[in-house]
Image (cartoon, grey):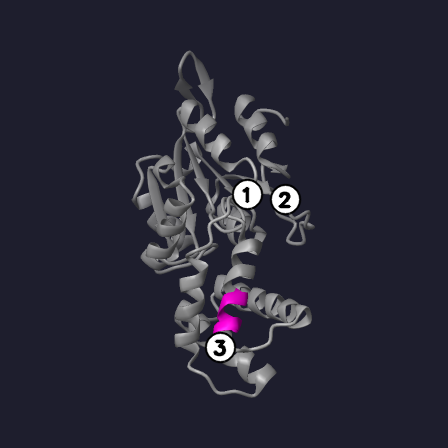
Amino acid sequence: MTNKKGDHLVKYKQIIFDVDDTLIDFAATEDYALHSLFNKNRWQLTPELQRQYHAYNQGLWRQLEQGEITYEELSEKTFHDFIKENFDLEIDGLKAMEEYRSYFGEAHKLLPGVEDTLKFAKKQGYKLTVLSNGEKFMQRHRLELAGIKDYFDLIVTSEEAHYSKPDEHAFDYFFSRTEISPDQTIFFGDGLQSDILGAEKYGFDSVWYNHRHRKNTLNLHPLFEVENYPQFVKLMQNDFEKKY
């Protein structure tokens, strides 16, 4: 479907953005929060242990995205099980997660080119929105601290939707909150399992922001793949009709 914008036709009216590792640098955020939590509790965090945590945490998030565990179970298990396994300590997993999320909420380093891209997209007339697997308060707070919250007309989290991407119910909830249909929408995100798979299953287009240079192991079919924000701006300049 094409839509009039100014004196020409464009393919989309709405862009959905992911937050973590799409707008905000997740690696820097996680590094800060993890070191802060371990320092507070006097747990030694070696580089090897940090690598183990990354792999372990990614596994839990995959289970969440595949519907194998709930968000509440993830919150309880993450640090309870990891600290038990590596330090043989019995801790309150939810309390540790609350501490971690408090530190996590303080970190808001934007990835390169984010704000310039949002400014450009706004000037082009796109409705800018967010769909994030995360907590309502935390994600809004981080976007506000980063100085970009006001660019977005709609911010939706999995906490509000009661489902996580790529579950179609998360997208059902999102589209119940906006007047723009899926065929007038394009998703921009870094996550194959959550963002690109979710959009593909729901039947609308996506751009894979592959700035970590990962392989498309799920054999998904985003409309385009970009490695940086200037490439995404080029796509918008071309009305998503051709590559930069």
**Do callouts 1 and 2 mark residues in contact (Cβ within 8 Å)?**
yes
Earlier in the chain: of badge 1 and badge 3, it is 3
User: Crowding at label 1, few (<14), some or many (≥20) Cα neighbours within 10 Å?
Assistant: some
**Which residue in the structure is indicated by mark 1?**
111
On the rendered image, what quadrant is the N terminus found in? top left
- Is label 2 in contact with label 3 (beta carbons under 8 Å)? no
Q: Quadrant of residue 54?
A: bottom right
- Residue at 56% across, 51% down: 191
* Mark 1 secondary-structure assignment: loop
In front: label 1 or label 3: 3
Q: Earlier in the sequence, mark 2 or mark 3?
A: 3
Q: Residue at x 54, y 80 (%)?
A: 83
Name the residue tied to disc 3.
41
Q: Nearer the viewer, mark 2 or mark 3?
A: 3
Q: Which residues are magenta?
A: 34-40
Label at residue 13: none
